[in-house]
Every structure is written in C-alpha cells, then in structure tokens.
Amino acid sequence: MLHKKNITPQGYFEYTVFPLEGVWDLADEAKGLEKLDKEKLIYTIMIRQPDFVTYDIAHTVINSMKNKKPNQLYDKVKFESIEDGMCVQMMHVGSYDSEPISFSKMEEYCRANNLKRTSRSHREIYITYARKTPAEKLKTVQAKLSEKGIYADNLGSSQFLPWEVFIETVRLLHEKGGRAIRGNAINYRLGESGLPIDSVEGNIALKIYRKKLGESVFRRITPVACILIWAGICRHEPNLLILKEKWNKY
C-alpha cells in the first residue's frame, strides 16, 4: 500500500478492497452454437478502485510491482473507467455452470416488463471467494443492460428498481445537504419516527411508489444504498446515506 510507504494520495481514506468482477462475452464464431464452448469466452477481469486512485497512482503501483515481483502479465494490466448504463441484475447462488437458469429469469423479466436488451455481453460481481466456497454456495451478482432500471433478485415479489428510485434518492441527498437517514421500513409505517418522509426509504415510498402516511412500506433501502455505494456515488455511516463530495457539487 502506498500510504505505508509515506506516499499518501490526495483524498486517501481507509477502505475495504472491492470484490472481483468480470465482463463476459463470446467470440463471434461461438455465438450461434447450441452448446457453450468455454474456450471461446472473451472476458475482462477487474477490481473497482476507490475514487482517490488516478491513472498516475495506478501506474506507480504497477511499476513498483514489476520491480518487486516481476511478472509478464503486469504489462496487460490497465487502469480504465467504464460506464454500465441501465441494467437488469440479480444474485446468482450456486455453480457457475448453472448460471443459464439465472439468465433465463432475467430475460423473462425483461420480456414481461417491456425491456430491451442492448448487449449480449454480461457483467459478474463475485461476492464469495471461489477457491474457498462450495460450488452450491457461490454468490455472483449478474447484470445485463436494459432501459428502465435494475432487477434485484433478493427483493422477493418487488424485484425491479426503476432508475427514478436512484434519481430521487440523489435529489433528496442534495436537498438535505448531502446526507439523509436511511429509514426503517421493517418496524415503522410511513411518517412514524423511524420512517419519516425525509428519510431515504420514506421519500422513495412517498414520491416513487405513492404510499400514504400510515401505510406499511416494502423495504428497499439495502439494495438502493448498496448500489449507490458500489457505484461510488454514496458512502454510509450508521443509519445514514451520504453523498460523496464530488457528486454533491452537481
């Protein structure tokens, strides 16, 4: 770590390493085959970096590792920015070989909700460590591009989160100076002390799902917060969702 060598990047903060991710596709000659040919897979493996990491910092680390532990693969390491766009995603639990079951569910959901898939590639986020986890317990978040929002498989019967949920959450955070309480939809009804209408959960229920004061609210705060934190837009403190400084300027 650079900060242990008395090199502290501007904006540095202690952080937990993000999970491994991969973008997967098939070579053109394999896309029409009935059976998957794993030898024809095209992929990019990556790990998200915290906001303070720049191109120069990344290459300082890469060059340092070349000198310390030479490896010809270092020349293939790149520091890039990517934009996902709108997507449908779900949590896949089990072997990678059973992923087609999850893909079928997402495709069925797209058809049912008039969503159009815009790319045949897909992205995976590996929540568990494959070498230490039994295949049947592997957890992988899978995402595919669509036009209207995100499909979160762990939300039971209300699995779709339209983009308006995230837009409204960021708007609320701007309005409240960059931070708002998350809200507790499990133990409180809308408007009660634990779920005020200016909490993230309460505001979503009121503005997006048109819930009324006193009504029960379906709990969505966990996936909403996790996605915004993962995207680098927000961070969290106990019971708070906080807009990162660079996003608070817009």
Image (cartoon, helix red, strand yellow):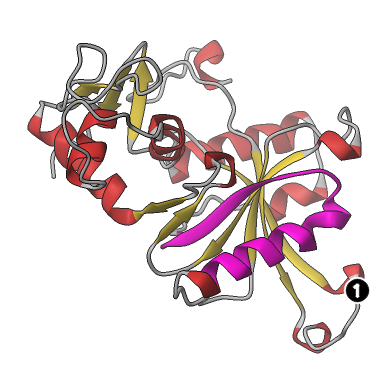
Q: Residue at x 23, y 26 (%)?
A: 190
Magenta stretch holds residue 83? no
Highlighted range, magenta: 84-110
SS of the residue under disc 1: loop
Of 58 and 106, the residue lying toward us: 106
Give left or right: position of 15 versus 129.
left
Do we see residue 247 in this rendering? no
Q: Residue at x 17, y 22 (%)?
A: 191
Q: Position of residue 123 (x, y in %)?
A: 62, 57
Q: Classify 56 as above or below 6.
A: below
Q: Position of residue 80 (x, y in %)?
A: 50, 54
- Where does the C terminus fall, quadrant-wise? top left
Of 164 and 170, the residue lying toward us: 164
Give left or right: position of 32 versus 154.
right
Q: Position of residue 233 (x, y in %)?
A: 33, 38
Under mark 1, the amino acid is Asp
